[in-house]
Image (cartoon, grey):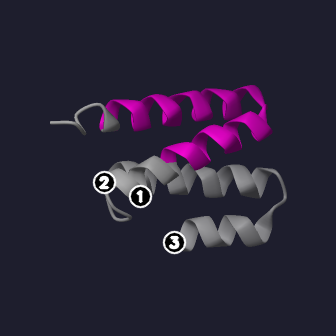
């Protein structure tokens, strides 16, 4: 029962990261998506849909920032 808040928290961080991406505030988007992915990996596992969704969008943000190596790593994790 203690982890009931985790999916909501991950979803909120993901949504805020996506909003900042749409606004062009990529550094803040990156921070929020990294946190969403970290919490997802720890609480739900690396193959959980919420974790994979955060990782995918984080890879896209890295690509927009020109961080190609980090984008490839996030998208292949």
Q: In which image quadrant can residue 70 be found? A: bottom right
Quarter of the picture containing the N terminus is: top left
Viewer-side label of 1, 3:
1
* Disc 2 packing (10 Å; few <14; some 14–19; many ≥20): some
Helix, strand or loop under label 2? loop
* Vertical comparison of 28 with 51: above or below: above
Q: In which image quadrant can residue 45 be found? A: bottom left
Helix, strand or loop under label 3? loop
Q: Residue furthest front?
A: 2
**Dot placed on the residue nearer the N-terminal end, 3 or 2:** 2
Any magenta on residue 54? no
The residue carrying mark 1 is 41
Question: Which circle marks residue 44 in the picture?
Answer: 2
* Disc 1 packing (10 Å; few <14; some 14–19; many ≥20): some
Magenta residues, start to end: 7-36
* Disc 3 packing (10 Å; few <14; some 14–19; many ≥20): few
Question: Which circle marks residue 77 in the picture?
Answer: 3
Calculate the distance from the C-alpha at mark 3 to the C-alpha at mark 2.
15 Å
């Amino acid at each position: 029962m203690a982890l009931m808040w985790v999916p909501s928290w991950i979803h909120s961080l993901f949504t805020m990261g996506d909003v900042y991406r749409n606004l062009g505030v990529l550094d803040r988007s990156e921070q929020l998506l990294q946190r969403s992915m970290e919490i997802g990996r720890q609480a739900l596992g690396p193959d959980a849909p919420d974790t994979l969704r955060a990782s995918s969008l984080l890879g896209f943000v890295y690509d927009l920032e020109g961080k190609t190596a980090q984008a490839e790593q996030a998208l292949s994790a």
